[in-house]
Structure formats: C-alpha cells, structure tokens
Image (cartoon, rainbow, N blue to C red):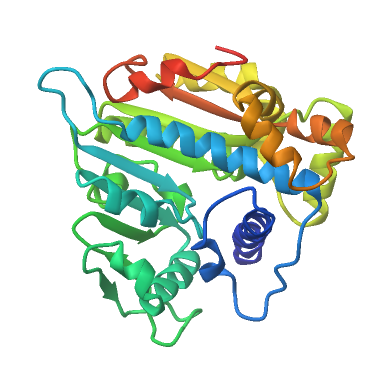
Amino acid sequence: MASKNRVVQATDTDALLSKVSAVRAGYLDDELAELFVPSGTDAGRKLPLINRGTYVRATAISALVEAFLEPSTEPDADQRRQIVSLGAGSDTRPFKYLPAHAQLVYHEVDFAASTARKAATIAAQPRLAAALDAPEYDLAAPPAFRPSPPVRSVSSGRYYLHGADLRRLGTAAAVAALGLAPDVPTLVLSECCLCYLEPEATHALLRALAAAVGPVGVVSYEPFGGDDAFGAVMVQNLAARGISMPALTLYPDLHRQLERLRGLGFGAAAGANVRFIHDDWLDARERARIDGLELLDEREEFDLLAAHYGVAWATSGGFRGAFAGWKRFHAQDS
C-alpha cells in the first residue's frame, strides 16, 4: 500500500512539471509554480499538445473557482467563502486567492508526505508565507520525511494544510477534525484526485463533506473514456506505472460522471471535456495568442486526448447564491 501511495503522490510532480512547462512557454502566468519543483528535477519543455492541455485544464478550473469567489450582489448575501482542496499537492491557488479575498478560508488536504513537502517549501519561501497571514508550522515531522527544518503542516487564520488519507475521511468525525466552518458557501475542489479512490471512498467523503458544510459545490477534473480503444490504452499505461483509477472504467464518460454526482445529492451538475472547453470557452483573441506560442501540429492527437479529460461542476442547491456565476459557463452535458 505504501508503494502505491508513493506512485500516486508522484503524479503531482508530473502535473507540476507540465504546469511549469506551460508557464515557461507563455501559456500560463504562475511564477510561483517553479518554487515547488524538487531540487535536481529536470523541468524540461513538454510537447505542445501537453502544454495546451495543461493550459486548458488550469484555465477552466481557475475560471470556475474565481466565479465562486465573486462577491454576491444579492441583498444581505453571505460573502464568506471556503475552499476544500482534495489532493492539493503543489497547487499554487491559495497563494493567489487568499490575499485577494479577505473572507476566504482555504483548506488543503493530501497525504502527510505531500503536505510535509509543501509545508517545508512554504517555510523556506517568504513569498509563499507572506500570502498566508502569519502562518504557524507543525514541527513534528513524520519519520519517513524529515526536511530541514522539519515541517509537517501549516495553519493560519485562513489557511490550513492537512496531512490526511482521503480514504479515511468519509465519516462525520473525520471531517469534523478538519475544523471546517459550517454554514459557509463551500467549494470542494478535486483536480485529478478522486479518480484514484475506490468509488465507495469517494462517495463517503463527498457525503460527509456535504453534511458538514453548506451550501456546497464541487469542481472536479477527471479522465474518462475507459470503454473505448483510447481509454483502454490509458488504463494499460497507468497499470504499467502501478496506478489504478477505478472511476475511469466505472464512469467512462462525462454523462455518467454527472449522473454519479447527482446520485450523491448534487442535483445541479454540468460538465465539458477539455476539447469542448478549448473550442467553446476561449475567445478568438485568446486562441490566436496561444496559437502563436508554438506550432500544434498534432491537432488530431490533441483532440483525441482532450476528449478523454473533462471538468464537472455541481451543487446541491442549484446554480444560485455563491454558485450563480457558474450559470454563464457553457456545458457540453448537463
């Protein structure tokens, strides 16, 4: 089990290096991403189709998060916001959004080894620490990981980095231990995370979170398509690396992924694959800008790959209140 956990944890480095490549190529503006690259790691340039896919992934998720963070114009609306990022890894969003949104509280949850690495990076980088309102550090490092200085987790008045196994968070008591604020509009963010869990663990976790906070919404980025030839190759390639994604075959298309969310109580659910988002969400000026960055001569390959990844957004109370901004995003399936 420990070796499988390490394989899954390593996927965060893969995603980080892809993001750094997209930043260096001019697709994304995220100068903080490089701060998380492990020392001695080769952050070489990725293929154009990887850079573009990474760009669409990051842009779509950030657009949905930023719509959630928009102040509500309704009279006496609750302007507080809470984000719970599952499998957060080296994500840099809290360092961008916390300084800009005074009523935002941000929780990140990941394996203890992953949060230890992130905590150590925050402690070593003044630019990161400055975004977190005088963070405090837990110096009791787990035996398997002893950075210098040894840091396991971080907390401040509005930021909390939790080292926890998501498979063990599917109960009211486990979620309560995170210290989430109840009755606050809450976004649960999963960027290629829940796909690694057995469905029963995912369902228990989402139900427990929905019961603890509210109103609640979910933004999830996942691969799918396990029932076609391309998806079968995906499954084989992942298996060769020791990676299993149960949801890839159990919920092999966007429609069934949305039906899954509805079955968990998120009645308002919509989604789009990366290809649709690339072609529909980007305006002509932005498409021209990224077309000018590098030649994408593998457009058919990009379309095939992009059709097997997608973003879903869903709420238990409809697209209103803190989630009203989501109504403006075109859905491929809803």
Relative placement, left or right, of 170 versus 1 is left
- Give whichever of 133, 289 is nearer the camera: 289
Query: Is residue 24 left or right of 113 when viewed as pictured?
Result: right
Quadrant showing the N terminus:
bottom right
Q: Residue 112: which quarter of the image?
A: bottom left
Q: Is residue 203 visible?
A: no
Q: Is 219 in front, or is 261?
A: 219
Q: Is residue 223 left or right of residue 191?
A: right
The residue positioned 37% from the left and 67% from the top of the image is: 128
User: Which residue corresponds to the image point at 44% horizontal and 23% vertical from the top-left?
Assistant: 314
Image quarter in which the C terminus is found? top right
The percent position of residue 182, horizontal first and vertical second, equals 19, 37
At 33% from the left and 79% from the top, the residue drawn is 140
Q: Is residue 183 visible?
A: yes
Q: In the rendered image of this protein, does residue 326 appear above or below residue 104?
A: above
104 or 73: which is nearer to us?
Answer: 73
Image coordinates of residue 147 in percent, x first then y, are: 46, 83
Residue 65 pos. (x, y %) = 41, 36
Residue at 26 percent across and 20 percent down: it is 321
Picture layout, residue 40 above or below residue 168: below
